[in-house]
Amino acid sequence: MIEMKHISKTYTRKGVETEALHQVNLKVNEGDIYGVIGYSGAGKSTLIRMINFLEKPTSGQVFINGIDLGSYSTSQLRDARKNIGMIFQHFNLLNSKTIFQNVAIPLVLSKVNKTQIKDRVLELLDFVGLADKAESYPNELSGGQKQRIGIARALASNPSVLLCDEATSALDPQTTDSILNLLKKINEEYNITILIITHEMSIIQKVCNRVAVMENGEIIEEGNVLDVFGSPQQTSTKKFVQTVIHDEIPASVKNKIKDVPNSRLFKVPFDQNDTNPIVNDLIRTFNITVNIVFASINEIKDDTIGYLVLQLIGEKDLLEKAAGYLSHPEIGAKELAK
């Protein structure tokens, strides 16, 4: 669907070169809701502008449905962009035009006949839940309603790809959730592939199935969201994940348990498909005391990820046997320092 190969982008200003992207490789499959996350200056917005060739890479290739956009003429590129919808952070609506007219803009520019325009615009306004706002103006709408209109406009030309550039950053949490639910609905009902640029890991958590983490113009980590959340490898990724997955023992708890004699700490991953009674087995099999000192369970789109931190208290040889039980690959626990 979308593939970027060895993409680099260098800007030159007053004789000074700045490399915004360096050798980026990215593949988004048909039907994905793919998230790209990074701090400000990581290169996210530059990357998204490469996908529809609003900016051309200094080197490398961008493929949409197997076609190299760099091989297109200006007119061919203009036609190709009709297949790529874009949603902006600040809505980009024209205040002088009605909601109907705003949504109709891509169709008017494509010289679609008026009857088809009317049918398509009303269909989309109904889809985003704003059929009654057709004759209103943008300044009469809330931020969430404006973004829904922006989404309807992006869908007007029936694209197969939808790009979201920080599309929820200007919205409150409740409105953000409603927009994310709308994006999931678009992905499922229209089978549109979605690429989301964001600096909020909670956005990735709620809707994406794959994620790439950017830093200094490079992708430093990429993969299935559940895998990246469950076992982040890079420092930046770990920081992002910790904003939504709280797997560190609070300092107040650590202070209470650090001096308990004859004890060891283990972090046990939670598997929603595992019915093994681990705590019960530890107590009954090894005759030790088990204290649950911390627990965290989070929903990641359609899955669940979580951890238990267990404090085992008992005789040294029994603790060693219990540690062997917990370290079995089927359980995958890791010992923590107190």
Image (cartoon, rainbow, N blue to C red):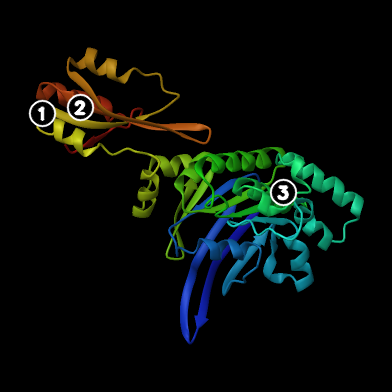
Extreme residue toward the front, this view: 140
Counting from the top left corner in percent of width and height, residue 332 is at 32, 32
* Amino acid marked by disc 3: Ala
Counting from the top left corner in percent of width and height, residue 59 is at 57, 73
Q: Residue sitting at 44 percent across and 61 percent down? A: 40
Q: What numbered label is drawn on residue 152?
A: 3
Q: Residue sitting at 53 percent across and 72 percent down? A: 9
Question: Marks 3 and 2, Cα distance to the nearest angstrom?
Answer: 53 Å
Q: Is residue 208 visible?
A: no
Q: Secondary structure at mark 1?
A: loop
- Neighbours of disc 2 within 10 Å: few (<14), some (14-19), many (20+): many
Is the Cβ of the residue at disc 3 closer than 8 Å to that at disc 1?
A: no
Vertical comparison of 283 with 38: above or below: above
The label nearer to you, 3 versus 1, is: 3
Q: Quadrant of residue 48?
A: bottom right
Q: Quadrant of the C terminus?
A: top left
Write down the residue under mark 2.
311
Q: Nearer the viewer, residue 95 or 321?
A: 95
Q: Secondary structure at mark 3?
A: helix
Counting from the top left corner in percent of width and height, residue 318 is at 15, 21
Q: Is residue 113 left or right of residue 319?
A: right
Which of the two discs, 3 and 1, labels the residue nearer the N terminus?
3
The label nearer to you, 3 versus 2, is: 3
Is the Cβ of the residue at disc 1 closer than 8 Å to that at disc 2?
A: yes
Write down the residue under mark 1.
260
Which of the two discs, 3 and 2, labels the residue nearer the N terminus?
3
Vertical comparison of 23 with 250: above or below: below
Q: Residue sitting at 36 percent across and 53 percent down? A: 234
Q: Quadrant of residue 56?
A: bottom right
Question: Marks 1 and 2, Cα distance to the nearest angstrom?
Answer: 9 Å
Counting from the top left corner in percent of width and height, residue 45 is at 54, 62
